[in-house]
Amino acid sequence: MPTTAAVLATDTRFAPTVLDVEASGFGRNSYPIEVGFVLPTGLTYCTLIRPEDDWTHWDAQAAQIHHISRALIIDRGLPAHLVAQKLNSELRGQTVYSDGWANDYTWLGMLYEAAGISPSFRLENLRILLSEAEADQWHRVKDQVSAENLLQRHRASSDARLLQLTFQRLRQNVSTSNASAPRHAG
């Protein structure tokens, strides 16, 4: 019997819930500054995260990429406990996918630790949903989808939406290829 992921991965109508986290930088002391997700319905959510007092690392190069200043997250970010509660409320019981699983898992861990609660959803690597052929085409298709949709890059919900649309395009391409394949009489 195929696993749930295998069944979902072969269903061309499937749009996974995708989550993305923007952070203060990379490395040991980085922390989440923005989280966003997109549901299978296309509904998106995004919020800035106010740093905890001991979250002080700031990488100016990372800030140039995502265009989020430390002053902005301090001024407009929500406290960790409110962000974690919102994520739990919206994503409860789901498997949620990320293309930067190792980093996003670590940053979500920091968020939930600061909030003093556990996630009500499971985070998985988006790669597990892709065939080898799809993985090989991923970056090319992602660039096409990005150019077509003029999505603002390096913001959490926009990046999550781009990932979801790329996944759907890859599935559409596989479905179209299978439908147009010649059929032989047996």
Image (spheres, rainbow, N blue to C red):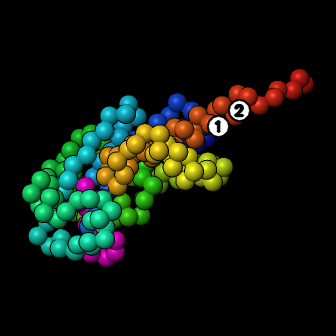
Q: Is residue 38 above or below residue 71?
A: above
Residue 41, position as x, y percentages in the image: 38, 31
Main secondary-structure element of the magenta-colored stretch: loop
C-beta proximity under 8 Å, tags 2 and 1: yes
Magenta segment boundaries in residue numbering: 25-34
Residue 168 makes an appearance in the image: yes
Identity of the amino acid at label 2? Answer: Asn
The residue located at (25%, 46%) in the rendering is 46
The residue located at (43%, 39%) in the rendering is 149
Between 75 and 92, the one lying in front of the other is 75
Between 118 and 83, the one lying in front of the other is 83
Of all residues, the one furthest to the top in this rendering is 185
Identity of the amino acid at label 1? Answer: Val
Label 2 Cα neighbours within 10 Å, binned few <14 / some 14-19 / many ≥20: few
Q: Residue 22 appears in which quarter of the rendering?
A: bottom left
* Placement of the N terminus among the 4 image quadrants: top right
C-alpha separation, residue under disc 2 versus residue under disc 1 = 6 Å
Residue 56, position as x, y percentages in the image: 17, 73
Label 1 Cα neighbours within 10 Å, binned few <14 / some 14-19 / many ≥20: some
The residue located at (32%, 51%) in the rendering is 156
> In this figure, which residue is indicated by the disc labeled 2?
178
Label ID, residue 174: 1
Q: Is residue 30 left or right of residue 138?
A: left
Of all residues, the one furthest to the right in this rendering is 186
Between 79 and 42, the one lying in front of the other is 42
Q: Residue 103 appears in which quarter of the rendering?
A: bottom left
Q: Is residue 145 magenta?
A: no
The residue located at (27%, 41%) in the rendering is 45
Residue 7 makes an appearance in the image: no
